[in-house]
Image (cartoon, rainbow, N blue to C red):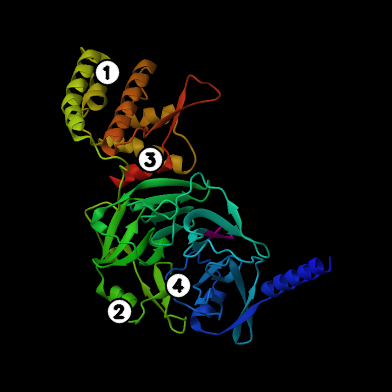
Amino acid sequence: MKFLFLTSISVFLLISNLTSQTYNIPSSNFFDFLYYIRKPISDITNTSGQLFFPIIINKKNSNQKILKDENGLFLFIEGTGQCYKANQIGAQLVFTRVDSTLYFGNNFNASIFSWRDTIFSFGGYGFWRTNGQLRYFKNGFEWNITPVNKEYPYREFIQNYLPEKGHFFYIQTPVLDESTSTRSTQYLALDLKMETKENTILGEISKELELQTKNYSYINLPSLEGTLIQSEKGVYLLRFAENTVYKLMNPAIIDDLYHKLPNGPKNTFEINSKIFFSDNLGNSFDSVAISIKDFKKEPYRLYNLAVGKPYNWPILIVFLLLFPAGIFLYIRRRYPYKHADVEVVSEDISLKGFHDLAFTELENSLISQIITKSKSGLPVSVEEVNKVLGLSKKTIEIQKKIRTETINRINHKFKVNFSVETDLIERIRYEEDRRYFKYTISVQNAFLYASNS
């Protein structure tokens, strides 16, 4: 009993010592800016090789990351779960430990960011595996895990975090499963929706980017809805939401960011179209303005939408040959003659452009209106669809016929153009009267449509 009592006292003292640790950092332009700015900086990148606190983990200097959210300025010790919060005392910032974590060990190279005044840690490596866990932290407590729909292993590589829209886009590199010695070979683009905690595979990264598994210099640019990466081919802006790539053409920006500092930019973040950066320990601090006008759009997509097995080309060729014939026979059977009261409407909507897989101006107008209302969480009514299609003065039978044909044709073109099985325009029955529909377009399908616009 005496041994257990002494052991309990020792553990208590150890925990008390850990939670009361403090470190001082001299005042500097970099830390003063982060401490006093009111705007949260939800993702600070390029933090490798920094040692603000003399903390050694496994006889090595542990990487130390910085974050500013609505609750203050924080510093994290990679691989431990340790979190320190800053307070100004005289000419120094005093960082005091605010967590009660003893040791993590499974979150080396994890991404740390904040969303809605909560700090999150995503992915990381440890205990012979790369994980895709999403963890969150509250002051004074240990880290907790929050469930996601499916776990995709991730170490911080290239990501694009848009806090106002709640999207955390990231690129998963080839992953080694050390328990089986199997390795994946794909570079996948994924979207973690913070509202629902759902991971979605967007596609495989285009070969034109020539990505390699290494520590890329990337800078998250929420104002430009993308992330900036430096590769051997140049500096690029990756926009995951619209599936596009832009090349930075302004040599002055490239020189300021990548040539003036011997170790490259550190502690990079962006506010109001200005990139802020420091040297290795935050001794120097500077900024450079940037806008979409500094870029040129590349002719290829960021990622290819079709992910999975390669096509069976012989079957695909046969399908492409037979498909137009099938469409022709279908039209001949369904439209043996034109009705006099719908002749003009049929010419503009029902028949014209059926073989052409490009969306017509009228179809694009309808799609745009549904996407706009769907973003606000509202469906489009039958009356609104009729108004766009110019059917308001037609009979109910003609309205229903042309409306159905138009939406079916749009969904058909969407499936063929993007090699998907889902409808672009979804029909939802009204609860009040199930004879009538309302229409909506999902966020994912809106992204796909926008990527080809």
- Whether the residues at callouts 2 and 3 have beta carbons within 8 Å, the answer is no
Give the extent of the magenta segment.
114-121
Coordinates of residue 374 in the picture (x, y in percent): 45, 40
Question: Quarter of the image holding residue 116?
Answer: bottom right
Chain-order first, disc 4 or disc 2: 4
- Give SS at disc 4: loop
Is residue 449 or residue 405 the one in the foreground?
449
Instruction: Judge whether 422 appears above or below 3 on screen.
Output: above
- Give SS at disc 1: helix
Around disc 2, counting alpha carbons within 10 Å, would you say few (fewer than 14), some (14 to 19), or many (20 or more)? few
Which quarter of the figure is the C terminus placed in?
top left
- Give SS at disc 3: helix
Work out whether residue 332 can be spotted.
yes
Q: Which of marks 2 and 1 is in front?
A: 2
Chain-order first, disc 3 or disc 4: 4
Q: Mark 3 points at which residue?
A: 445
Q: Mark 4 points at which residue?
A: 47
Q: Name the residue under label 2.
A: 259
Is residue 324 or residue 322 the one in the foreground?
322
Q: Nearer the viewer, mark 2 or mark 3?
A: 2
> What residue is rendered at 39% in x and 53% in y?
181
- Whether the residues at callouts 4 and 1 have beta carbons within 8 Å, the answer is no
- Give SS at disc 2: loop
Coordinates of residue 277 in the picture (x, y in percent): 42, 75
Chain-order first, disc 2 or disc 3: 2
Report the Cα–Cα distance between label 4 and label 1.
Answer: 65 Å
Instruction: Judge whether 284 appears above or below 170 on screen.
Output: below
